[in-house]
């Protein structure tokens, strides 16, 4: 990542089993890794008793950490959304109480997301990771403090509708991500191929270049803008 030009990276946990690995990376590379601790909706059924207290303790030890990747997913059959909701609400509550931004995964569960926000207000800043919702959904989220990250996967031609949504978003709310090791971008945006088709985070600069072209701006301009947006979204934690 460093060799490709990435200056900092946000590393998300997805379950309790990931927390120690993310912690180790953050301790080994404090100038490079911003840790994010949380429980992904796909792993909501795996939480063990006392997980909320352990998460709060971990966040207390890392003042630069945020919460995630958490959220809601109506695409998967298991765990059901009814199981995901209380785990998500607990993380929203903790994020608000500790004034930490939160990274949210939402897929085919937009009404559930807005219902959750009615029960637990989100923190002042939150990131809709790999946002694939409509512009109407985005406009409902923006006043609540949402930022929206563009994944290189959306450079595939079949994702043209997602690109059109990003063209309509406020430029001061857009970030760029890889979602590595998942969501591999199209071949012409892969600078760091990995056997088996995993997505290397070093692909990020090329993804940003291709995204800039699609938005009609200079790559350097977009990279500077999204870097500033990331600092604003994560409240200077980066």
Image (cartoon, rainbow, N blue to C red):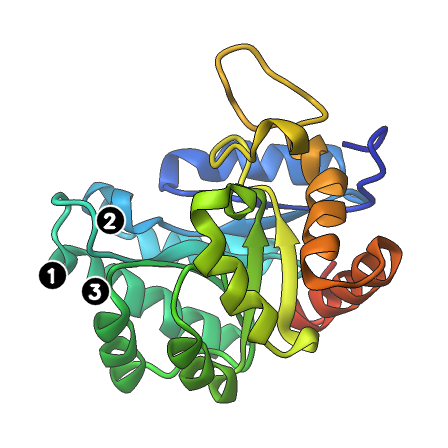
User: Which callout, 3 or 1, points to the residue nearer the camera?
Assistant: 1
In the rendered image, which residue does mark 3 sit on? 86
> Is residue 47 found left or right of 123 in the rendered image?
left
Note whether 43 is above or below 236 in the view shown. Answer: above
Q: Which mark is residue 82?
A: 1
Question: Quadrant of the rendered structure where residue 14 is?
Answer: top left
Q: Residues within 10 Å of mark 2 (few under 14, many from 20)?
A: many
Quadrant the C terminus occupies: bottom right
Q: Please name the residue shown 55% across and 51% down the image.
A: 36
The x and y percentages for residue 15 are 37, 41
Label 3: state its secondary structure: helix
C-alpha span from label 3 to label 2: 9 Å
| Nearest the eye: 141 or 162 | 162
| Nearest the eye: 170 or 216 | 216
Label 2: state its secondary structure: helix
Question: Quadrant of the rendered structure where residue 72 is?
Answer: bottom left
| Nearest the eye: 196 or 135 | 135
In the rendered image, which residue does mark 2 sit on? 44
Q: Which mark is residue 192?
A: none
Give the residue at the far top of this rendering.
195
C-alpha span from label 3 to label 1: 8 Å
Mark earlier in primary sequence (3, 2)? 2
């Amino acid at each position: 990542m460093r060799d490709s030009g990435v200056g900092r990276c946000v590393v998300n946990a997805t379950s309790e089993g990931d927390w120690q690995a993310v912690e180790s990376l953050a301790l080994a590379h404090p100038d490079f890794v911003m840790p994010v601790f949380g429980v992904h909706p796909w792993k909501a059924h795996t939480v063990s008793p006392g997980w909320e207290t352990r998460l709060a303790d971990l966040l207390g030890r890392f003042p630069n950490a945020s919460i995630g990747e958490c959220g809601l997913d109506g695409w998967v059959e298991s765990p059901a959304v009814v199981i995901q909701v209380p785990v998500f609400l607990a993380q929203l509550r903790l994020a608000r109480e500790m004034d930490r931004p939160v990274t949210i995964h939402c897929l085919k569960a937009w009404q559930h997301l807005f219902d959750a926000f009615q029960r637990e207000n989100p923190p002042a800043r939150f990131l809709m990771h790999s946002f694939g919702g409509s512009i109407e959904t985005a406009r409902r989220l923006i006043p609540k403090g949402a930022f929206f990250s563009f994944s290189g996967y959306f450079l595939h031609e079949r994702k043209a509708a997602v690109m059109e949504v990003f063209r309509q978003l406020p430029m001061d709310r857009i970030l760029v991500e890889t979602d590595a090791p998942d969501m591999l971008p199209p071949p012409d945006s892969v600078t760091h191929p990995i056997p088996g088709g995993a997505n290397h985070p070093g692909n990020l600069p090329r993804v940003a270049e291709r995204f800039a072209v699609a938005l009609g701006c200079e790559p350097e301009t977009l990279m500077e803008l999204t870097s500033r947006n990331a600092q604003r979204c994560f409240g200077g934690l980066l």
